[in-house]
C-alpha cells in the first residue's frame, strides 16, 4: 500500500471514530441549547420552541467553534422550514437563546446573508428570505437540504447536475496532460481499491470525492472548477456511508480506472464515455439519467 493510501485510511478511521486530529485539538463542541423552561432564558416571541431546538444533526456537525455551529443550526432550521420565509431574527434573542456573544450572532447572520438565506435591512431588521433567493449551489445549503424534508428533491437535482457537469469535465481534462495530476488521480483509485478490500467505506468515499473534485479542477474551465464543491457535496449526500444508499463495488472502481487510462492517453471521448458509465452505475443516478426526447 502506498504511503498516501495508508495516511488517508488512517485519517478517515480517526475521523469516523470521533477522535480529534492534531489540527482540531483546540476546537470545542457547541454547547447544547438550554431547555425552553430553563430559568433566566427568555422564550422566543410567539412561543416558537423550534427556534431553540438542537437536534442530532447539529450535535454531530463539523467542529467549527461557536460561530460555525450557530451558522449550522440556524441554516438547518431555515432550510427545513422550521423558520419560514419572512420570519424575523432578532440578534439579541438569538444570543440569549443559544448563550453566545453578540459578535458570534452578528458574524453568523452575515454568513447566512451571504448564502441568501436571510436579509438585513435598516428599520426592518433581519428576516428569513424565500427559497427563490437562496444560493442553492452553496455546499452547506446542499447538505442542509439533503438531510431535511427536501432530501429527495435535493439528491435527484444533484445527480442530474452531476450528469451534466462531470462527463464534460472528463473530456476537457484529457487535454491537460499533467503527469502530477494523473498520478494523483491514480493514487485515489489505488486508495479506493485498498479501502474496498478492507471494507472501509469512509476512506473509499473520501478518495472518490477527491478524485471527482480534482478531475473538475484540471478541466481548464474556471466556471466548471467553481462547481467542484457541488460535486463533493453530491457525493457526500448521495453515495457515501452517510446515507448507506450505495456501497463500493468492483464495477465502480473499474470505471474510475478507465477514466485514468483515458486521461493518460489524452483520449477525451473515452474519458467522457467512461464517466457516463460510472455515473450510470450509481443506483440513484440511473433513475435520473435523461431519456432521449421524442420528436
Image (tube, grey):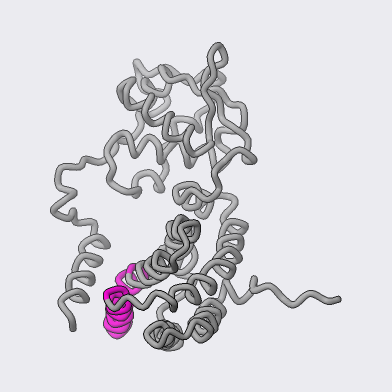
* Quarter assignment of residue 97: top left
What is the magenta segment's predominant secondary structure? helix
Q: Residue at x 24, y 60 (%)?
A: 15
Q: Is residue 272 above or below residue 46?
A: below
* Quarter assignment of residue 10: bottom left
Quadrant where the N terminus sits is: bottom left
Q: Residue at x 50, y 52 (%)?
A: 142
Q: Is residue 14 magenta?
A: no
Q: Is residue 158 above or below residue 167?
A: above
Q: Residue furthest right?
A: 295
Q: Is residue 53 visible?
A: yes
Residue 54 in the figure: left or right of residue 203: right
Q: Residue at x 47, y 52 (%)?
A: 143
Q: Nearer the viewer, residue 75 or 263?
A: 263
x%, y% of residue 266? Answer: 42, 84
Residue 171 in the figure: left or right of residue 59: right
x%, y% of residue 182? Answer: 32, 78
x%, y% of residue 265? Answer: 40, 88
Residue 185 in the figure: left or right of residue 83: left
Residue 90 in the figure: left or right of residue 198: right
Q: Residue at x 40, y 79 (%)?
A: 248
x%, y% of residue 259? Answer: 43, 83
Quadrant where the C terminus sits is: bottom right
Q: Is residue 200 visible?
A: no
Q: Residue furthest top?
A: 123
Q: Nearer the viewer, residue 3 or 43?
A: 3
* Quarter assignment of residue 198: bottom left
Q: Is residue 188 magenta?
A: yes
Magenta-highlighted residues: 180-206
Amino acid at each position: 500500500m502506498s504511503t498516501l493510501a495508508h495516511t488517508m485510511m488512517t485519517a478517515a478511521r480517526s475521523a469516523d471514530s470521533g477522535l480529534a486530529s492534531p489540527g482540531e485539538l483546540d476546537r470545542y463542541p457547541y454547547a447544547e441549547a438550554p431547555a425552553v423552561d430553563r430559568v433566566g432564558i427568555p422564550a422566543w416571541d410567539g412561543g416558537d420552541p423550534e427556534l431553540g431546538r438542537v437536534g442530532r444533526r447539529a450535535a454531530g456537525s463539523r467542529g467549527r467553534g461557536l460561530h460555525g455551529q450557530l451558522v449550522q443550526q440556524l441554516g438547518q432550521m431555515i432550510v427545513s422550514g422550521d423558520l419560514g420565509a419572512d420570519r424575523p431574527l432578532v440578534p439579541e434573542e438569538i444570543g440569549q437563546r443559544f448563550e453566545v456573544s453578540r459578535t458570534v450572532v452578528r458574524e453568523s447572520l452575515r454568513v447566512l446573508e451571504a448564502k441568501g438565506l436571510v436579509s438585513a435591512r435598516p428599520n426592518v431588521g433581519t428576516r428569513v428570505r424565500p427559497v427563490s433567493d437562496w444560493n442553492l449551489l452553496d455546499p452547506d445549503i446542499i447538505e442542509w437540504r439533503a438531510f431535511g424534508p427536501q432530501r429527495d428533491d435535493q439528491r435527484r437535482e444533484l445527480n442530474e447536475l452531476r450528469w451534466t457537469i462531470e462527463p464534460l469535465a472528463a473530456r476537457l481534462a484529457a487535454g491537460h496532460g499533467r503527469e502530477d495530476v494523473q498520478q494523483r488521480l491514480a493514487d485515489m483509485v489505488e486508495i479506493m481499491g485498498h479501502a474496498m478490500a478492507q471494507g472501509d467505506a469512509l476512506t473509499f468515499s473520501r478518495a472518490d470525492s477527491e478524485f471527482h473534485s480534482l478531475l473538475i479542477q484540471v478541466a481548464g474551465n474556471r466556471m466548471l472548477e467553481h462547481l467542484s464543491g457541488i460535486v463533493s457535496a453530491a457525493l457526500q449526500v448521495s453515495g457515501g456511508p452517510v446515507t448507506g444508499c450505495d456501497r463500493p463495488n468492483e464495477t465502480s472502481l473499474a470505471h474510475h480506472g478507465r477514466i485514468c487510462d483515458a486521461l493518460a492517453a489524452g483520449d477525451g471521448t473515452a474519458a467522457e464515455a467512461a464517466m457516463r458509465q460510472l455515473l450510470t452505475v450509481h443506483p440513484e443516478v440511473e433513475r435520473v439519467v435523461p431519456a432521449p426526447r421524442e420528436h
